[in-house]
Amino acid sequence: MIRLLSLFVLLVGLNAAAAQGLKAPVDLVRASLVAETASVRAGEPFTVALRLVMKPGWHVYWRNPGDSGLPPEMVWTLPAGVSAGPIQWPAPERIPVAHLMNYGYEGDIALLVTITPPASLDPASPVKVAGKLSYLVCEVECVPGSANLSLTLPVASAPPAIDPGSAALFRRARAALPEPAPAPAHLSVEGERLVLALGGLGLDPTSLRSAAFFPYSETAIDNAAAQEFKADAAGIRLTLARATPSEPPPATLPGVLVVETAAGDPGRRAFAIGEEPGSAPAAGQIPDVAVPAPKAASGPAPDEALTLLGAAGLAFLGGLILNLMPCVFPVLSIKVLSLVRHSGESQSRVRLHGLAYTLGVLASFLALAGLLIALKSGGATIGWGFQLQSPLVVAGLAYLLFAMGLSLSGVMHLGGALAGLGDGLSRRGGLEGSFLTGILATVVATPCTAPFMGAAIGFALTQSALTGLAVFASLGLGLALPFLLLTAWPGALARLPRPGAWMETLKGALAFPVYATAAWLVWVLAQQVGPEGLLAALVGLVLVAFSAWTWERARTASSLPARLARVLSLAALLGAGALALGLERGGGAVSLAGEGAEPFTQARLDGLLREGRPVLVNMTAAWCITCQVNERTALSTEAVRTVLRERGIAYLKGDWTNQNPEITKLLELHGRSGVPLYLLYAGPGEPMVLPQILTKGTVLAALESVKPVGGGQSAALGGTRP
């Protein structure tokens, strides 16, 4: 709801800007993608530049925009096996706007990014590097803009040569990057102000004309306050106003110091102070530990080795295994039970039920895949299971399954329109019920990730739309195949028991796993919306039950009471829907208590790796059943916790219950489109990618391959004891 309101406000602002005669972003910013080399060689990184040329008086923003604004963001679309490093940010300028102070760039700016191709490339297939650049360009008014950028480079066997046409651009871009500070900075507190001292700069104090500090943190200092500086032979001291004097001062203040000297000196120089979160050092070289490439511990080959046929095969196997997952098995069991009812029908009619179910599965998988591909093409950072990041979808699915359970328990008769269970559509053949059961099976399958699925879906989302749809269709075919074979094989049908009174008992028993699934969805919802939202969802379940009860009463009532009962039933259902629409994100999501885990951020991961610490990264979500099973059977066991402590392995846990673009980017870097993802960084270089289905033995074997860090125990866990 908040995002919809934000979009509405943005659209209103753009209409107002157009009414005032503001020019379109294409007139204000010219964006292009430039490569430093004229060709690509397998396994050798190369550098590209996101070049933005602004109209005079207009500016874009640095990674920390200051008091307002948004930094440029690039959502890459790269071939399988090709990865993009983080943006290397040039030193910014202070840009005052009214009473605010922004950090950004004017004129002509180039943002460097390192692209790493895989170890093998087809010489006959050029490498296409593409993506969608989003930015905010401002003068006094601000106008959002975007550009779809791409370039295609041939594959060469010889070392790539520098493109003479772009050499000057890249020299200027590297010269604008901050250089590492020559010595550690010292931070002290003087009342409500911070004093940052840095020595060893080798500058003539008499030639220093100005100095400005740009923190990486957006809440560290009062951006608009004057920055006083003093320079002597020992170095430079800056006095900075704290943003919130009432809060404890920071222990460190990483950022960029920019100094300008008189003519004849180097002019403008920039120094990177402290750890830069989630980025590369100023010299433009990405250390091996900062942006590692994925490495599989077991299972299928790395994603870059996948072909369409291989990805389709993995997807098909994953779809088959999905039938055994706890989210799908109850629905499939109910459908098999309904098939017993049709055992007296002709073989051709039973086969039609199998085809209708299969078509329902395939249609819903293709629709879901098409939506996912379209949203990602539009720049959205989402992946498999993205719809379950919406409280509205989770609540709606919980209501639907709760209603199914009530039908199985005999509280009401839904008919075939929802799950193919009732008699209404059965009398007309029930094919609509079989089709819709296929849709329901797909919907409830999305919280589960079966083995082989991760690599296949990750491959699908990096290829063309047609290839992606083919892989998702294979996944759907795997999910539908067992039921399709059951309806097509006369011998299997002959072994099904005859209809009888036992069916009503079994149908009632099957209601309870459906109730359990609904209860689990309510628990997921509690992680997303907090206590107040949970209360609203529970009231919604009561309204669904009341709606079912009154609707069933209407079946046996006389005309007027029946109409009144139906009105009450529909009103209760509308009330439940209104409560679901009002749900907003706001819960705590995945708990870290008692696990010795820290919340994942890319900055924290990079910092630990630069310190030489081994790290276990767990990407999870409350709605991911596979994740929760792995937590309880492997990751949260005392044996695993003990090895983490003894070997000094830091444990980072990323929560994807709600949307988190930073987690999505790491998933995509390792060829995945959804959770779970388990990475073990044993040292510099590539991480080990653990299987999606974990056992305690698998995890212990991986952890015990890590060389213990000096001291071990909880020191490497950021001070958190499990």
Image: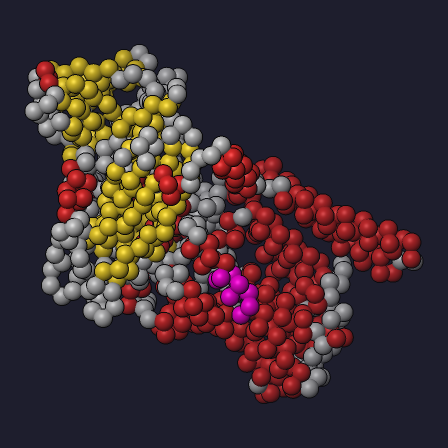
Q: Nearer the viewer, residue 412 or 497?
A: 412
Q: Main secondary structure of the magenta part?
A: helix
- For the question of whether residue 703 can be seen, the reply is no
Q: Is residue 61 above or below residue 523?
A: above
Residue sitting at the far front:
21
In the rendered image, residue 64, in percent from the top left (x then y), is placed at: 33, 32
- For the question of whether residue 265 can be seen, the reply is yes
Q: Is residue 135 above or below residue 447?
A: above
Q: Which residues are magenta?
A: 362-370
Q: Nearer the viewer, residue 174 or 354?
A: 174
Q: Is residue 713 above or below residue 225?
A: below
Q: Is residue 688 left or right of residue 525?
A: left
In the rendered image, residue 15, in percent from the top left (x then y), is placed at: 52, 37
In the rendered image, residue 351, in percent from the top left (x then y), is placed at: 62, 82
* Residue shown at the point (38%, 32%) measured from the top left: 138
Q: Nearer the viewer, residue 708 or 76?
A: 76
* Residue shown at the point (13%, 27%) measured from the top left: 267
Q: Nearer the viewer, residue 89 or 288?
A: 89
Q: Report if residue 366 lies within the magenta region.
A: yes
* Residue shown at the point (70%, 84%) measured from the top left: 345
Q: Quadrant of residue 204?
A: top left
Q: Quadrant of residue 258?
A: top left
In the rendered image, residue 43, in percent from the top left (x then y), is placed at: 18, 60
Residue sitting at the far top:
191
Q: Report if residue 588 lies within the magenta region.
A: no
